Image: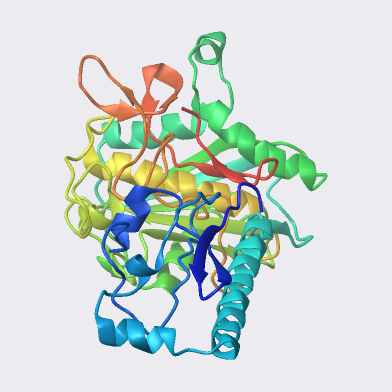
Amino acid sequence: MANQQACPLAHRGLMIHVLCYENQELLESHNVSTTSPVHEPTHLYIFTSLFTKSYTTQTINTSQLFPTSKSLNSQISKMGFSQITLLLLVQLSLINLCLGTRKLNSLYQPPPMSLTYHKGDLLEGNLPISILWYGDFSPAQKSIVSDFLLSLNPQNQQQQKQNPSVSNWWNTIQIYMKKAGKKQTNVVVANQVSDNNYSIGKKLTKSQISELAHVANSKPGGLTLVLTAQDVAVEGFCMSNCGFHGSDTKLKSAFIWVGNSVTQCPGQCAWPFHKPIYGPQTTPLGAPNGDVGLDGMIVNLASLLAGTVTNPFGNGYFMGSAGAPLEAASACPGVYGKGAYPGYAGELLVDSVTGASYNGFGVSGRKYLLPALFDPNTSQCSTIV
C-alpha cells in the first residue's frame, strides 16, 4: 500500500508494528490520544483507518499502551514469548483483513445506471397530440400548455437563438430514438376538446381517464392528453401520483393524464413552486408563467411525455420492473439544474423582472421549468442549465 508505515513498539525484545491513523484529527475524532495511555492493558490494539488513502508513522511506547499501574505492568512482564507471538499473529491477521477489505472496496465500482431498450414500439415520426381539457381552464392556462408542446420542435429562428430552449431539452429524447433505430419524434398538436361541464362528474377513476382519452381520439396511433382542472379528484391523485400514462395496444395509441394540483396537493405535485409536504421547507421558486398549478402541470407533463414517447406500451426504454419502471425522466426525480439535491432544485435561470425560476425558453417568449432527463449516452441525469 502506498505510503504505508509502521510504528515500532519494543516489548521484551520483540518488535511489534502498529499501523497508525493518518493525522491528529482522526485520532481525536476516534477518542484516541497520542499523549495519554490507551486504557485497555490486556490487549494490544492496532489502530487503522479504512477511510484514508495513506498512513503515517507515529511512535507508541508501552507507557502509552498501558497504564503505569505496577500490577498491570506486572501482568505484561509475565507474558511469555509464545503468548506475545500468538497475540501478534492475531493482530496481524486483523490487519490483513482490514487492508484486504479496503483494497476490495477501492477496486469495486458500482455498475452505471442504464435504461434498457426492450425492443418494443416507440412513438416515432410525426406524433399527433390531442388535448382534452376536462373542467374549467382559462384561455391563458390553455396557452401555457399549447405553447409548451409547440416549443418541443424548433418553430422559428428566434427560438433557436434563445438557449437553453425547450427543443434542446427534447433533443435528449431524440437520442433514444436514434439508438433504437427509429425516426425522430416531431410533436404536432392535432386537436383540442373542452369538457367544461364535467360530463362524468368531478370524481374520476383511472378507467374513466382511459375512456376520456378514447373520446378525444378514437383513431389509431397518436397521443392524447387528458388534463383535469383543480376541482377534479382522480383515483390515486396526490396519494400515489401526480399523473400517469397508459396505452391501447389494439389501436397503438397512448394517453397521458395530469391534474392541476393547486388546491389539492401543491406541496406534492407543484414543487418547487410550493413548499413541499415534507423535508426542508425552503422558499418556493417563482412560477415562470405566474401560475403555480399550470407550471406544476408542465413539470409533470414533460416528465410523462418523455416516458410515454420512449416507453409507450411497456416494452420500450425503462429500468427496473415493467410494473414500476423508471423511465427517461422518472429516473431523475427532483433534478432541474446542476447541483440539485433533495429539497434543492439546482442552479436555475432567474427572470430579472418577475424573479421566477426557469431553465428553458419556449415559443412566444415563454419560459418553462423542465425536469432532468436520463442521458443514454452518458448514463447520467442531464439538465439543460
* Numbered disc total: 0
* Residue drawn 39% across the image and 41% down it: 340
* Residue drawn 41% across the image and 84% down it: 76
Q: Relative to 348, does residue 335 appear above or below in the rendering?
A: below
Q: Nearer the viewer, residue 136 or 278?
A: 278
Q: Is residue 330 visible?
A: yes
Q: Nearer the viewer, residue 226 or 321?
A: 321
Q: Is residue 222 visible?
A: no
Q: Residue furthest right?
A: 181
Question: In the rendered view of the protein, which quadrant contains the N terminus?
Answer: bottom right
* Residue drawn 58% across the image and 50% down it: 328
Q: Nearer the viewer, residue 342 or 176?
A: 342
Colouring rule applied to residues: rainbow
Image location (x, y in percent) of residue 23: 40, 48
Image location (x, y in percent) of residue 197: 26, 56
Q: Quadrant of residue 184?
A: top right
* Residue drawn 30% across the image and 58% down it: 29
Q: Quadrant of residue 288?
A: top left
Is residue 232 left or right of 143 when viewed as pictured? left
Q: Relative to 63, does residue 51 appear above or below in the rendering?
A: above
Image location (x, y in percent) of residue 180: 79, 48
